[in-house]
């Protein structure tokens, strides 16, 4: 059996799943279902990318351990995928044990091969945030997170020899013109490589929430080696042996990714694979973004999230799946709005498809078919029926060629053109007029049979994208559970339905929506969603008196003070807290000389967990204030209080 391996990006569980995440996942699911229907042995992978500083910080803010924090969010992603009918075969979490072990092995192999080397990472460093930032990330030259001064600093780090792969990657693009899709993204990649690649920093020491480099545990593997390798570790690849799954499914047939991460997949990922002597995936498809109202990429930080849980609950999953894949051509950006969603539901789903089914079923249930079924068998067909049958028989091949190139929107528009043809055909024939005229009854049945067969074909083709709707149609036209009429290849055949026209009437597929009323309701919901967010945020900033009581603040005298070697910012202090002496490292060297501090009484956070700064263990922290006007830092001196006094 031919295999097909498709992946989505693995999502950061740093906030809740939103419509943007649903986009790749629904698209990949539609392709997985489509390929399975066509007889492929499919491996469909999705998952979560759980390490990194952002997640560490978010967890800290929520007062949770990182793993506990991500567990909660990952469970919500999984719940959403279940609701949306995502038929993944594997769900990888980068915190899974097997992944961690494999990443460590892969890292070591690359190091032993000389593909990874130890060097120095330099960049803008914010001491309180313990983070490096690239030039472009700074806001007015200051730390983008806390707004404080940053300084150029160096840190030991491992580097992957990315630069040496430039030519090899360009060569690969040339030999594999389909590798990056759509074409425009390929040109961007070529330009990027030609402008010069640099070796890639693949480890960090400034945060801890990551996979430790096992032979140098001060370092954690920095995002991309951890994240990208998920596509092979999930198949059992750990750098040394090829597992059965790896042999069966690798190379991936396509990685679906958003356009902003094409670079990582089309440059870094190939280079890592080349370094490991592994064949490259067949294709990277960079889809566009769903933009929301004001042209922003939808994301929680911009506060323009439309809750997919709410929308699925309100309109059904197929409406959302249809909308996402129909409204926006897959390679381009496009807008999401509640108005266009409701517009599509009313026109395409309720009017076109829903109406075609309901009017047909209604007509069939109005008559007793048993008398005439014999005559129908004669299959008298006029030019009009032939037109429908020809279109139906062409449709599957046309649809396949669009789906094979991930042109969901065009594939769907072909089906909807056919639906519209069928509706016009019914209008033209007006079969209800024949009902009472005995000699026209055969024609009446002929029209109905033609439409029911058309609906059978339609249901097969839309099933990968709208699985629930396809099933409902098949139940209503009496095709469900009938053998050999609703498999993929049956969409290329005509006349498979039982000629006795057994139909079952159930509720409308997509009830029409009162647009204005609904938009008002959604607006209210979105307000309360924002309010929820606001109150969640303000709740996060509020602490209870019990929380405050956890912090022990004590007056301490500075006994000694000296600059920290290799640091312009840090001073090393020895403090007496009334009982004993302890060392504290503080980032105040820009504002005080050691002499100014000695013998001063300050406020010490007594029970702060120790941390290492520039190799020195700091046992606590002294309180200082950043002046609102000139941002200068002033230590809070309390010389009228004696060392050991408690502050509460
Ligand atoms: N963890 C990395 C991917 C690693 S893959 C080895 C990451 N995660 S992410 O959660 O930030 O984004 C995951 C995907 O969601 C990206 O492909 C991104 O483009 C996509 N989307 C997030 N918001 C989106 C829209 N508004 N529209 C469409 N997709 C967008 O990057």
Image (cartoon, rainbow, N blue to C red):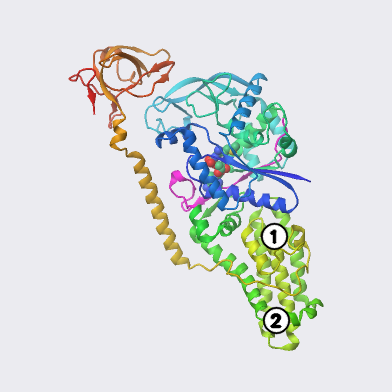
SS class of the residue under badge 2? loop
Packing grade of label 2 (10 A; few <14, some 14-19, many >=20) is few
Q: Is residue 245 left or right of residue 513?
A: right
The residue nearer to you, when weighing 648 against 259, is 648
Q: Write the start and end of the magenta stretch as one range.
A: 278-307
Q: Is residue 232 left or right of residue 600?
A: right
Q: Is residue 339 above or below residue 379?
A: above
Q: Is residue 177 above or below residue 124?
A: below
What residue lies at 52% left-to-right and 56% top-to-bottom? Answer: 312
Of tags 2 and 1, which is closer to the observer?
Answer: 2
Where does the image place residue 80, in percent across and percent down from the top left?
Answer: 54, 49
CA distance separating discs 2 and 1: 30 Å
Q: Is residue 644 above or below residue 148?
A: above
According to the image, label 1 marks what residue? 461
Where does the image place residue 586, in percent across and percent down from the top left?
Answer: 35, 20
Q: Quadrant of residue 127?
A: top left
């Amino acid at each position: 059996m031919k295999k097909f391996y498709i992946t989505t990006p693995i999502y950061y569980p740093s906030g809740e799943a939103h419509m943007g995440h649903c986009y790749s996942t629904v698209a990949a699911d539609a392709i997985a279902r489509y390929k399975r229907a066509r007889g492929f042995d499919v491996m469909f992978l999705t998952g979560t990318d759980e390490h990194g500083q952002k997640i560490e910080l978010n967890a800290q803010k929520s007062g949770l351990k990182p793993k506990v924090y991500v567990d909660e969010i990952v469970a919500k992603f999984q719940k959403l995928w279940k609701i949306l009918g995502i038929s993944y075969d594997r769900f990888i979490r980068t915190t899974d044990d097997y992944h961690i072990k494999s990443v460590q092995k892969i890292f070591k192999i690359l190091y032993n091969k000389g593909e990874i080397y130890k060097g120095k990472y330099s960049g803008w460093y914010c001491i309180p945030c313990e983070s490096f930032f690239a030039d472009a990330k700074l806001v007015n030259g200051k730390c983008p997170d806390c707004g404080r001064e940053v300084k150029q600093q160096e840190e030991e780090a491992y580097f992957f020899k990315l630069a040496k792969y430039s030519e090899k990657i360009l060569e690969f693009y040339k030999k594999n013109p389909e590798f990056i899709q759509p074409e425009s993204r390929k040109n961007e990649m070529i330009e990027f490589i030609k402008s010069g690649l640099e070796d890639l920093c693949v480890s960090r020491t400034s945060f801890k929430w990551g996979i430790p480099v096992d032979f140098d545990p001060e370092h954690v593997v920095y995002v991309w080696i951890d994240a990208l390798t998920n596509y092979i570790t999930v198949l059992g690849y750990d750098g040394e042996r090829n597992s059965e799954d790896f042999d069966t499914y690798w190379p991936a047939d396509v990685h679906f990714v958003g356009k902003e991460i094409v670079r990582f997949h089309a440059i870094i990922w190939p280079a890592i694979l080349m370094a490991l002597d592994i064949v490259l995936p067949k294709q990277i498809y960079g889809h566009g973004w769903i933009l929301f109202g004001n042209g922003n990429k939808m994301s929680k930080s911009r506060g323009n999230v439309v809750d997919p849980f709410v929308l699925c609950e309100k309109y059904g999953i197929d409406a959302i799946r249809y909308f996402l894949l129909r409204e926006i051509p897959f390679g381009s950006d496009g807008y999401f709005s509640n108005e266009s969603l409701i517009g599509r539901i009313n026109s395409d789903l309720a009017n076109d498809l829903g109406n075609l089914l309901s009017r047909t079923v209604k007509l069939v249930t109005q008559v007793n078919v048993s008398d005439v079924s014999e005559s129908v068998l004669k299959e008298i067909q006029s030019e009009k029926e032939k037109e429908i049958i020809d279109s139906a028989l062409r449709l599957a091949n046309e649809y396949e060629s669009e789906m094979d190139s991930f042109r969901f929107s065009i594939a769907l528009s072909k089906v909807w053109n056919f639906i519209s043809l069928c509706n016009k055909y019914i209008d033209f024939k007006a079969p209800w007029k024949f009902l009472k005229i005995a000699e026209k009854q055969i024609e009446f049945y002929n029209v109905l049979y033609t439409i029911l067969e058309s609906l059978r074909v339609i249901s097969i083709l839309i099933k990968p994208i709208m699985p629930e709707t396809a099933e409902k149609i098949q139940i209503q036209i009496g095709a469900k559970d009938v053998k050999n009429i609703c498999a993929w290849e049956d969409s290329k055949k005509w006349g498979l339905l039982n000629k006795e026209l057994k139909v079952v009437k159930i509720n409308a597929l997509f009830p029409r929506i009162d647009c204005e009323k609904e938009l008002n309701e959604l607006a209210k919901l979105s307000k309360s969603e924002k309010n929820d967010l606001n109150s969640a945020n303000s709740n996060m900033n509020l602490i209870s008196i019990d929380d405050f009581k956890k912090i022990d603040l004590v007056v301490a005298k500075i006994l000694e003070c000296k600059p920290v070697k290799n640091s312009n910012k840090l001073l090393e202090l020895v403090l007496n807290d009334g009982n004993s002496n302890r060392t504290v490292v503080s980032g105040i060297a820009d504002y005080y000389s050691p002499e100014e501090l000695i013998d001063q009484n300050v406020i010490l956070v007594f029970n702060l967990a120790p941390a290492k700064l520039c190799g020195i263990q700091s046992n606590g922290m002294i309180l200082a204030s950043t002046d609102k006007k000139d941002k200068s830092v002033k230590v809070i001196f309390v010389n009228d209080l004696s060392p050991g006094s408690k502050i509460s």
